[in-house]
Image (cartoon, grey):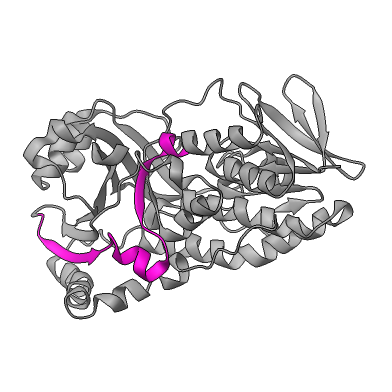
Amino acid sequence: MRRQALIVGGGIGGLCAAISLSLTGWDVQVFEQASQITEIGAGLQVSPNGVKILERIGVMERLNSALFEPEAIEIRMGISGRPILYLPMKGAAAQRWGAPYIQVHRADLITALLARLEALQRGAVQTGCAVRGYAPCKDGAEVILTNGQRIQADLVIGADGIHSKIRHQMHGPDAPRFTGNYAWRALVPKAQLDALAPPPSGCIWAGPKKHAVTTYVRGGDVVNFVGIVEQTIWREESWSRTGDRQETLADFDGWAPPITAILEQAEVLHKWALFDRAPLPQWHDGHVVLIGDAAHPMLPSMAQGAVQSLEDGYHLARTLGAAEGANIPAACARHYAQRIARTSKVQRVSAENLQLFHKSSRGAQMMSYAPIWLAGQLTPSLVHRRNDWLYGAAIPPLNI
């Protein structure tokens, strides 16, 4: 009989796990609490390690019209716009790491993942289906829905995000630490910005006690903005809270015209606090396992949250491919043992990078940015080499 997996959460990690497991012979069912999949979220940067997984599971071909391949990764001064670093990426990423570096709207990536899963197992996703928790059962585990219904399977995957109910049951209340930063995000059609559109790159704009990142989505037709600002106190951790335009403009007062133009033209500005969490001592409890943000939420400073969720879903399926029935808990333990060092490093470096581009004094800026400028001018390959461990990861085929 085909083994069965219940996946709590229809986000990037959960859908990747569902597709990967389906390709390896599992029956999958995804429970998504939202009543429908909508335009939630904003722009994502998917580095070559994530793109290679999307290629392996047959999703990239569904993304071609929606993605944008940036010319470069740039660093500029936020106020003057003066360039600090320019690293070519278009073509160079595939040559060095085996796949391109792309930018895409989260909703477009979710749509492509959903379409691929539907082609493999029609009706695998149930929306409007909230999960209360899980329980062990003979040779497996069961999901408990909020309506009291219990559904059994060989495996339960908690892919239910940063406020995971599955993680809460497995490890108890977590203790998120406010990083002293909050973030703005916005989307603006490029046509509205005209000559003030930012460069066609992944551009970091560095400034005193804050920085911004501009990227492109929807095939290059829409500009995605994220701005991270230092703040001393915050009580709420929310992705969907909206903010005031005048507050945003005050945060980035005097910055380069592309930044202020984005903030002036944005229809909606979202604001959320950045919290981090320590790595967990384990990701599984018998036949129940965590992936993605439920297992290792990470700050956006390396643009790896979505990519590490893809890695989790794919790696879990590969690890389970060699397991039979009673060996599922052992496979989940191996998945953790093989992934924890990598995800913990990404968490740590993301936290370290958070304020890398927040230097306030001229002296501090020179100390930090002059070596980056010089390395980009003289030895760009050495700058690329810093990401070899991450972007160049080998992605073996699934055990089909």
Residue at 70%, 43% in the rendered image: 157
What is the x, y in percent for residue 365?
18, 67
151 to 209, vertically: above or below: above
135 to 214, vertically: above or below: above
Apparent side of residue 72 relative to residue 175 in the rendered image (left or right): left
Among the 4 quarters of the image, the one containing residue 312:
bottom right
Q: Nearer the viewer, residue 85 or 154?
A: 154
Q: Is residue 102 magenta?
A: yes
Q: Nearer the viewer, residue 82 or 66?
A: 66
Q: Quadrant of the N terminus?
A: top right
Query: Which residue is at the far right?
Result: 138
What is the x, y in percent for residue 158?
67, 42
Among the 4 quarters of the image, the one containing residue 324:
bottom right
Q: Nearer the viewer, residue 388 or 134?
A: 388
Q: Is residue 307 magenta?
A: no
Q: Which residues are magenta?
A: 81-109
Count of marks placed on residues: 0
Residue at 11%, 52% in the rendered image: 79
Q: Quadrant of the C terminus?
A: bottom right
Apparent side of residue 179 relative to residue 202 in the rendered image (left or right): right
359 to 35, vertically: above or below: below
- From where the camera sits, is residue 253 visible? no
What is the x, y in percent for residue 150?
81, 27
Apparent side of residue 120 relative to residue 92 in the rendered image (left or right): right
What is the x, y in percent for residue 286?
82, 50
Residue at 9%, 59% in the rendered image: 82
Residue at 29%, 40% in the rendered image: 219
